[in-house]
Image (cartoon, rainbow, N blue to C red):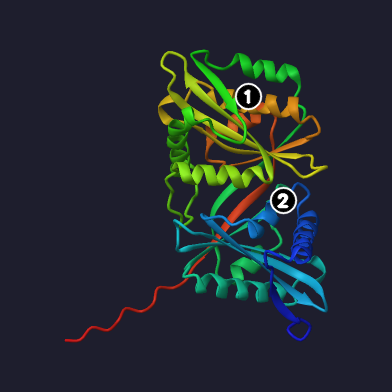
């Protein structure tokens, strides 16, 4: 393939045409490989390179031959924490697989992340529920990756019948109430919300991924809200104990702004450990789902990702009618440590 491969090109923030071609390859590959897969929205992908983010850098590149992108890749770097870690994505057109395109893209990604001082690389791969294999898995294993975490990708068909919602509503503990907001957490709730988000980053199952939980502060939260608002409507619900107003859980749902999109995404859901067992996860997901169905009736599928070992959350999702459609595999590779410097006598 190397004689056909003209060059690797990096996608700059001002090259809208190249970015659209990059995104088109991502969409083509996901549609070819994953019946229930969803690509990043155009707005989300474009802002990754066109809108500065003090907390994350995303570098996009492509393998180009005769003006055609044969495959594309990205390297994502957290800028304020986890400075050892790089998140890599690779998409190779089905017609040119097993010809060296993927290896060339991975080699380039390794150079990019090593230049940034990152020694651990993580990628996501997907298995269909009716298959024991997935495109890219043998490739990952052959390049030294191992599986370090798994999650189920679950899909909920919309709208959910009213009778099911009513049954779920009746199961919720009435000692708690739910408040909601959109793209911006109200200042009066911010401190409590930041505590929950920090807890979420510490509690979320990640298997053996070499990741260090982060602490959310106001600057990080407001920067994230601004970035997300450029690509999504956000719907957040928080649950409070009625007797004292203590905020003890939250859930966020994201609705792409892209015209014609029919998907929505159930993002984080957390209930603080001491308040579990009251069906508060159900209350939170109900609140965001009801707003979604009221304000965005054109959405026909709601996606979420759950560790199968998170039994309570998995059961809650099944109660709503979610069905597992894929298994997400996180694979990881770590650079060998350099040999120790010799010591003199």
Hey, which quadrant is residue 137 in on the image? bottom right
- Disc 2 element: helix
Q: Say which residue appears at 51% left-offset and 24% top-offset.
A: 239
Hey, which quadrant is residue 70 in on the image? bottom right
Q: Say which residue appears at 61% left-offset and 28% top-offset.
A: 285
Counting from the top left corner in percent of width and height, residue 98 is at: 74, 74
Q: Nearer the viewer, residue 279 or 292?
A: 292
Counting from the top left corner in percent of width and height, residue 224 is at: 56, 45
Q: Nearer the viewer, residue 22 or 47?
A: 47
Counting from the top left corner in percent of width and height, residue 309 is at: 53, 40
Q: Nearer the viewer, residue 117 or 18?
A: 18
Q: In which quadrant is the N terminus drawn?
A: bottom right
Q: Nearer the viewer, mark 1 or mark 2?
A: 2
Hey, which quadrant is residue 301 in on the image? top right
Q: Say which residue appears at 53% left-offset and 30% top-offset.
A: 186
Label 2 sits on residue? 43
Q: Nearer the viewer, residue 261 or 101?
A: 261
Asked whether residue 273 is in view, the answer is yes
Label 1 sits on residue? 287
> How many other residues sit within 10 Å of disc 2, few (<14), some (14-19) or many (≥20)?
some
Q: Say which residue appears at 61% left-offset and 66% top-offset.
A: 140
> How many other residues sit within 10 Å of disc 1, few (<14), some (14-19) or many (≥20)?
many
Asked whether residue 205 is in view, the answer is no
Residue situated furthest left in the rendering: 345
- Disc 1 element: helix
Horizontal side of 314 relative to 326 (left or right) equals left
Q: In which quadrant is the C terminus drawn?
A: bottom left
Q: CA distance from mark 1 to mark 2?
A: 26 Å
Counting from the top left corner in percent of width and height, residue 196 is at: 46, 35
Q: Please report whichever mark, 1 or 2, sits nearer to the chain's N-terminal start.
A: 2
Horizontal side of 326 relative to 180 (left or right) equals right
């Amino acid at each position: 393939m190397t004689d056909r491969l003209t060059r690797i090109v990096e996608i700059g923030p001002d090259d809208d045409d190249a970015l659209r071609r990059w995104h088109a390859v991502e969409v083509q590959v996901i549609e070819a490989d994953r019946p229930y897969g969803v690509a990043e929205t155009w707005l989300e992908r474009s802002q990754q390179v066109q809108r500065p983010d003090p907390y994350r850098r995303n570098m996009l590149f492509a393998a180009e031959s005769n003006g055609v992108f044969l495959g594309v890749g990205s390297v994502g770097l957290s800028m304020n924490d986890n400075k050892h870690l790089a998140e890599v994505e690779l998409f190779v057109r089905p017609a040119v697989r097993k010809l060296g395109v993927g290896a060339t893209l991975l080699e380039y990604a390794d150079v990019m992340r090593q230049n940034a001082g990152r020694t651990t690389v993580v990628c996501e791969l997907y298995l269909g529920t009716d298959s024991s294999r997935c495109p890219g898995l043998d490739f990952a294993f052959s390049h030294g990756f191992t599986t370090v975490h798994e999650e189920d990708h679950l899909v909920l068909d919309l709208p959910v019948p009213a009778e099911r919602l009513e049954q779920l509503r009746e199961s919720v503990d009435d000692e708690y109430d739910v408040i909601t907001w959109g793209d911006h957490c109200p200042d009066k709730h911010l401190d409590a919300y930041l505590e929950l988000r920090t807890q979420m980053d510490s509690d979320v199952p990640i298997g053996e991924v070499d990741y260090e939980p982060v602490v959310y502060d106001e600057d990080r939260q407001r920067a994230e809200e601004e970035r997300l608002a450029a690509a999504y409507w956000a719907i957040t619900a928080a649950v409070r104990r009625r007797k004292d107003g203590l905020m003890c859980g939250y859930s966020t749902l994201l609705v792409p702004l892209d015209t014609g999109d029919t998907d929505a995404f159930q993002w984080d859901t957390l209930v603080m450990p001491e308040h579990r067992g009251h069906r508060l996860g159900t209350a939170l997901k109900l609140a965001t789902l009801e707003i979604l169905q009221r304000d965005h009736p054109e959405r026909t599928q709601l996606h979420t990702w759950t560790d199968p070992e998170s039994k309570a959350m998995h059961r809650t999702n099944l109660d709503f009618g979610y069905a597992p459609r894929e298994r997400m595999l996180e694979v990881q590779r770590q650079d060998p440590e350099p040999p120790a410097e010799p010591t003199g006598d």
